[in-house]
């Protein structure tokens, strides 16, 4: 390690140890009650893999490692704000990763720090959960874990989703708990197949709020509990229309008259046709796949903007106007992005807004809206279209 990096690492370690007691107080004031179990003490570099439930997950992980500084891998999107980006670089030095594609430089940076004995934290789902159930880890994670040759700690955060749902416009007060689930030694990982590693991590990180709230109901109290839900749930189960859902207060309703109340336990009243966000979400994702088989799916919205990522954490606007997604690809004015060579898109959440990152052989791009028509439907349909395109070309 060169002298400059060594000095920077020493500074970041001092900030970590000094700031954690302060952050404990601030996070408790912001999110409410939480508890965390101390992590086992390990020497040298290792990888921490937490599930991604809410906006404060990195703090809950850090509180279990109060004396062991680590670097977090974060979305490149967070560095677009110059003030925030410079603050993070100086104070915490996170590793930047471009979503919606393969970022080899981020992986190389991660491996270099590990070889120098520095722990790294990665959220292997790649995104915060939309429905309260932990998503499967990224397909390349298992190979990275075995290649790294360091211990791997899985870390589970429970209660984060109901405290701070990704789609919500307000916080709720309930209970959050974080703890290490398992420590995998390098020799143990070498004996496991990639499928076995993936299955083990998915099992360790699994949180299902439907099941946990059925077994031990905990109220998460707040105001305007349903507001923002139309970003997650965009197909009405009654009329089948897309983009006609609206939220106000604790109520989510459709223009057709369908209406449900979202309560403090995270369930709907009445509980038909779906009792929870997860049940509704699973149905709508299968509904999208069904429509791909039976009709010509197409989404279109106004006030769209497509930007290209250029240089370091900078973008340039390529076009503004009406965006359309169909079987041929993504279109906006004269811009057209075919499915060929396109990577699976990912959503970035920052400051309460969503943008969709995607990439092809020519570069990385993002789709965003001035308003909030529901970017998630574009991300899900585009992912399904790309998956089918890849299956047909194999």
Image: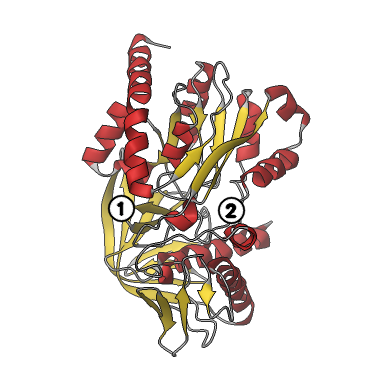
Q: Quadrant of the N terminus?
A: top left
- Residue corresponding to mark 1: 351
Q: Is residue 205 above or below residue 153?
A: below
The picture places residue 17, in percent across and down from the top left corner, at: 37, 22
Q: Is residue 8 above or below residue 245?
A: above
Of mark 1 and mark 2, the one earlier in the sequence is 2
- Residue corresponding to mark 2: 135
**Category of crowding for the residue at label 2, using alpha-carbon neighbours closer than 10 angstroms: few (below 14), some (14–19), many (at least 20):** many
**Label drawn at residue 322:** none
SS at mark 2 in the image: loop
Residue 92 visible to the viewer: no
Q: Look at 41% across and 70% down and name the residue there.
A: 226
Left or right: residue 80 compared with residue 250: left
Residue 24 visible to the viewer: yes
Closest to the observer: 345 or 155?
A: 155
The picture places residue 365, in percent across and down from the top left corner, at: 38, 53
Closest to the observer: 345 or 54?
A: 54
Is the Cβ of the residue at disc 1 closer than 8 Å to that at disc 2?
no
Q: Quadrant of the C terminus?
A: bottom right
Distance of label 1 from label 2 (alpha carbons): 22 Å
Q: Look at 58% across and 73% down and name the residue there.
A: 275
The picture places residue 335, in percent across and down from the top left corner, at: 35, 64
Residue furthest out toward the bottom: 256
């Amino acid at each position: 390690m060169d002298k400059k990096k060594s000095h920077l690492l020493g500074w970041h370690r001092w900030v970590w140890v000094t700031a954690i007691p302060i952050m404990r107080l601030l996070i408790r004031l912001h999110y409410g009650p939480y508890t965390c179990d101390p992590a086992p003490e390990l020497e040298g570099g290792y990888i921490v893999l937490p599930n991604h439930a809410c906006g404060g997950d990195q703090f809950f992980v850090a509180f279990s490692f109060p004396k062991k500084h680590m670097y977090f891998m974060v979305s490149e999107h967070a560095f677009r704000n110059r003030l925030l980006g410079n603050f993070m670089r100086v104070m915490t030095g996170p590793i930047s990763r471009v979503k919606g594609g393969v970022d080899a430089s981020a992986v190389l940076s991660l491996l270099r720090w590990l070889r120098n004995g520095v722990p790294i934290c990665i959220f292997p789902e790649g995104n915060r959960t939309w429905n309260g159930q932990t998503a499967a880890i990224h397909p390349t994670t298992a190979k990275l874990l075995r290649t790294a040759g360091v211990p791997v700690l899985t870390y589970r955060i429970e209660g984060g989703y109901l405290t701070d749902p990704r789609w919500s416009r307000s916080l709720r007060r309930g209970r959050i708990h974080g703890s290490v689930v398992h420590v995998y030694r390098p020799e143990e990982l070498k004996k496991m197949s990639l499928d076995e590693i993936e299955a083990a991590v998915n099992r360790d990180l699994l949180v299902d709020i439907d099941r946990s709230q059925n077994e031990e109901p905990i109220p998460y109290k707040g105001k305007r509990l349903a507001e923002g839900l139309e970003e997650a749930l965009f197909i009405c189960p009654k009329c089948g229309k897309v983009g006609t859902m609206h939220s106000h207060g604790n109520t989510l309703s459709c223009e057709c008259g369908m209406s449900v109340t979202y309560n403090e336990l995270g369930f709907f009243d009445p509980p038909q046709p779906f009792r929870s966000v997860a049940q509704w979400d699973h149905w709508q994702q299968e509904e999208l796949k069904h429509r791909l088989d039976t009709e010509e799916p197409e989404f279109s919205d106004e006030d769209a903007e497509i930007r290209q990522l250029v240089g370091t954490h900078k973008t340039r606007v390529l076009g503004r106007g009406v965006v359309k997604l169909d079987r041929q690809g993504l279109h906006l004015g004269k811009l057209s992005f075919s499915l060929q060579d396109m990577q699976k898109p990912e959503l970035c959440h920052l400051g309460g807004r969503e943008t969709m990152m995607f990439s092809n052989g020519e570069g990385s791009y993002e789709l965003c809206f001035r308003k909030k028509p529901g970017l998630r439907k574009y991300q899900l349909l585009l992912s399904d279209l790309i998956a089918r395109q890849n299956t047909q070309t194999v």
